[in-house]
Image (cartoon, helix red, strand yellow):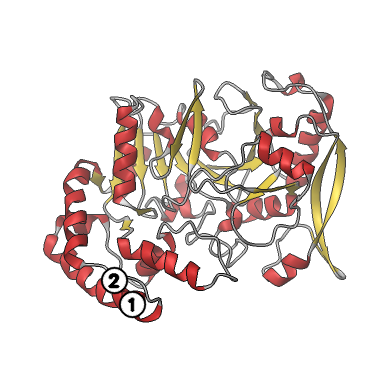
Amino acid sequence: MANVAVVGTQWGDEGKGKIVDLYAAKADVIARFHGGNNAGHTLVVNGRKTILHLIPSGILHDNKICIIGNGVVVDPAVLLREIEELHKGGLFPPNTKLYISERAHLIMPYHRSLDLAREAQNPGKKIGTTGRGIGPAYEDKAARTGIRVGDLYDEELFRKKLHHALEEKNFLLKGLFKEKTLVEDDIAAEYLGYAGKLKSYVADTSLILYDEIKKGKKILFEGAQGSNLDIDYGTYPYVTSSHTIAGNASCGSGIGANAINKVVGICKAYTTRVGEGPFPTELNDATGEHMQKVGQEFGATTGRKRRCGWLDIVLVRQAVRVSGINALAITKLDVLTGLDKIKICVGYKSGDKKFTHAVPANMRTLSQCQPVYEEFDGWKENISHAKKIEDLPVNAQKYLRRLEELAEANVILVSVGSGREETISLKDPFLN
């Protein structure tokens, strides 16, 4: 049996929620290893839509262990609201357990305030942050001034850390950004109140994972966002604040790298991105509008309309390389139905330079790149009932074969609709 990491190959929003939900049925443990509530995974089960921001998508299955790892930054209010909504909707199975790493860092009110203040300060140079405080929380983690989940259970330590942090944050909010300062006692009361509600979920999740791996259990590591939003390998600075590539599954969950046997990259059949930053294959025409409308391309977290464009294989190849992806799951193939012609970007041109396997690190260069396309005939048939590749129209099969060749990774799953059952499964990733 194999332990599997699932990561996005584009700029996020690839449909990881559905794929994780499908693979969670086969797994024993599902672990989220980075990011915060700036990510949203949308699942559709029996026609009912559920959006999760912090809790692993495997939570909808019974007899599972779901873990929020040390690499995640946690907004306790959001987490408790998700738990409550799952219970209220009858979606938190009785025999499934949820654990939060005691080493995970907390998102504090001043993180959200700083996030919004910085974005407002630079209207012409926005990064496209969700304003949830994720970046500032990771900053404090790196600066060794962060507050961790486990600190809530040592009130003296918690208050000391909070006091120290607020001295600096209030100075910045008032002196630099001309924003309202925050009251220490109010924050302390709020967060110490969360402590009691969260206590039953807090644990040394690294140890739990280690024990489950020793027992031979199947572990699914759930990534958020996409490889091209990685803090190092993404389109910096238009990226998130954590490592989104598969290597962080180890660091962000507290297990050895040798515990991950397979990496599945989730690749949308076209490309989308939310927020700012260069987008070589973006379509500001009727085709882009078709993708946006049919694909219901709105951010699960912010509700922002996603920018849409043709599939960009340069992005995907880079993701395959830096994440060690050895299998691809293709999502939203059905959205391309009805288009007369379909294109894949196989490279970029910028002056006399060509890029085929790596995205330029310089954003000015990337913004000047022109896509080089291969064109394919489209299909009109409804594909949502397909159960085998052979059930797909010939042109859809050709498109998938070429995508697989260009990406240099095998396709093991094709999603042809939003529901669990609207899926063509070619290979079980948990089987070596």
Determine if residue 1 is in view. no
State which quadrant residue 334 falls in: top right
SS of the residue at dot 1? helix
Q: Quadrant of residue 404?
A: top right
* Res. 162 mark: none
User: CB atoms at circles 2 and 1 under 8 Å apart?
Assistant: yes
93 left or right of 336?
A: left
Report which residue position mark 2 lands on: 181
In the image, residue 108 sits, relative to residue 307, either above or below, namely below
Q: On the rendered image, what quadrant is the C terminus found in?
A: top right
Give the residue pinned by disc 1. Answer: 174
Residue visible at 20% across and 67% down in the picture: 184
Q: Is residue 130 above or below residue 333?
A: below
Residue 62 position within the rendered picture, expressed as x and y whole percent measured from the top left: 36, 25
Left or right? Give the position of 376 relative to 226: right
User: What amino acid is found at the position of numbered circle 1 in the picture?
Assistant: Lys
Mark earlier in primary sequence (2, 1): 1
7 and 302: which is toward the camera = 302
Question: What is the x, y in percent for residue 35?
Answer: 44, 53
Instruction: Say which of 238 and 304 sits in front.
Output: 304
- Furthest toward the bottom, the residue is 175
In this rendering, would 251 be left or right of 182?
A: right
Mark 2 element type = loop
Is the residue marked by circle 1 packed among few (<14), some (14-19), or many (20+) residues within 10 Å? few
Mark 2: which amino acid? Thr
Q: Residue at x 28, y 24 (%)?
A: 94
